[in-house]
Every structure is written in C-alpha cells, then in structure tokens.
Image (tube, rainbow, N blue to C red):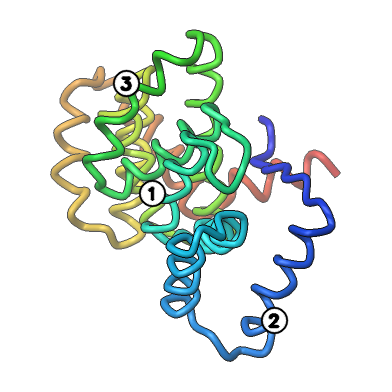
C-alpha cells in the first residue's frame, strides 16, 4: 500500500511565503478560523500562491472548506500547477464531507482522466481515511470509509462497507448502525462473522500493531 504523500516543489519565493504564513501559528497567535480567513483574503487579493499554502495546511487538518477550495484550485491551476489527479482526490474527500457540489463535479474530472488513472486515484481515498483512523483515532474516518465503499467508490464493496460501518458504530458513531445493518443484508450470512472479527481487530488496532511487529 502506497503511503499518502503530497510532493510540492517550493521555490525560494514560496518557501518565504510558507514561513510567513506559519509565523503566527508557531507563536500560537492565530486559530484555524482566523487562518482560513487569512487565506480567503490572500485569494481575494489575487495572492493565489499564499492562499494555496493556507488552504493546503488547513486541508491536512481536515478543514472542509479548505478541502473544497483545493479541489477547485488544482482543477483550475490557481495558485498551483493544474493537476486533475489531485483535484479528483480532494473532490472525493470533499464529497465525503457531504458537499453535493463536489459529488457532481466528479464526473467532469473523470472525463479528463483515463480509466486506470481514475481507479488508481480512487484507491488513495481509503488509504487516507484509514491512516486518519489509525493515527488520529478519528472515528468519523471509519464512518466515511463505510460510506465510501457503499455509495461513492468506483468499485463498490459491501463487505468493506459493512466492515467500516461496524468499526464506526463500535467507536461511537451510532448513526451508522442502520447503514451497517442495511449493507449487511446484501452480504452472505456465512461471511458476516469473519467480517465482524476483522472489524474487532481494526477497532482494537491489533491488525495494525501486529503487522508492524511482523515487519520488524
């Protein structure tokens, strides 16, 4: 499984902007909301490179508005090089935040990519969400994984959907209970117990920790 890595080549100018944008954050002077407004201000003033950096940093923290903005900036090539691959990635993440505009936009981006690339990018989404669940204990990421595999992924997988809905319910996302049970009706009964056991291993993180020990 490939790690989720964004490679951004900063030249000297962008590096200086990056340092300037983070000066207040390092000193704990500015909160995320104020930082976002600062990015909007940069954008409105036509300082697109600065706004891109602000939105990128906030998107890394899961800011919904920043993720939406990046999906558009990558699509149009504003503040960064035009990149349909990254635009699609952020658009899918945006869709999982409940933004219907992003969901509608996916089809137009798909038309600009070949099928193999489209599927390849789709495989990054569960990697990102699973990483957030494991490293950040983000139970909403588990719920999003269930929804991804049930409704959004180009490769619908009800077993994986049931798996992650189960994990999210156990983690306390009780609104996923009906969704889990709905998806469970589409899975062979003989497979349910095995998936439930796998869900327990994921929830307790045994699957991840044991695999790390085996790799050492």
Distance, label 2 to label 3, CA atoms, is 39 Å
Residue 107 disc label = 3
Tell me the SS state at disc 1: helix
Query: Is residue 187 placed above or below 58 in the rendered structure?
Result: above
Against 160, is 8 above or below? Answer: below
Circle 3 sits in a helix, a strand or a loop, which is it? helix
Image point (66%, 30%), residue name: 1
Q: Earlier in the sequence, mark 2 or mark 1?
A: 2
Disc 3 to disc 1, how far (Cα)?
16 Å
Question: Where's residue 213, x and y in %?
Answer: 77, 47
- Residue drawn at x 18%, y 54% as measured from the top left: 175
Earlier residue among tags 2 and 3: 2
Q: CA distance from mark 2 to mark 1?
A: 25 Å
Q: Mark 2–mark 1 contact, CB under 8 Å?
A: no
Name the side, left or right, on which 5 lies relative to 69. Answer: right
129 sits left or right of 16 in the view: left
* Residue topped by disc 1: 68
Q: Residue at label 2? A: 23
Secondary structure category for the residue under label 2: helix
């Amino acid at each position: 499984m490939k790690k989720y890595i964004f490679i951004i080549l900063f030249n000297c100018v962008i590096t200086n902007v990056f340092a300037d944008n983070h000066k207040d954050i390092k000193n704990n002077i500015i909160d995320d909301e104020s930082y976002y407004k600062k990015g909007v201000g940069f954008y409105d003033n036509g300082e697109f490179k600065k706004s891109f950096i602000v939105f990128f940093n906030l998107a890394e923290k899961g800011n919904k508005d920043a993720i939406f903005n990046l999906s558009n900036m990558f699509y149009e090539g504003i503040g960064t090089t035009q990149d349909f691959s990254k635009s699609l990635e952020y658009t899918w993440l945006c869709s999982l935040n409940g933004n219907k505009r992003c969901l509608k936009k996916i089809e137009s981006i798909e038309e600009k990519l070949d099928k193999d690339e489209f599927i390849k990018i789709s495989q990054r989404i569960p990697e990102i969400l699973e990483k957030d669940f494991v490293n950040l204990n983000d139970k909403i990421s588990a719920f999003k994984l269930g929804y991804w595999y049930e409704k959004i992924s180009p490769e619908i997988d009800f077993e994986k959907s049931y798996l992650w809905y189960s994990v999210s319910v156990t983690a306390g996302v009780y609104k996923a209970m009906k969704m889990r049970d709905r998806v469970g009706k589409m899975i062979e009964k003989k497979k349910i117990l095995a998936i439930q056991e796998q869900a327990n291993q994921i929830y307790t993180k045994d699957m991840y920790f044991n695999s790390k020990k085996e790799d050492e």
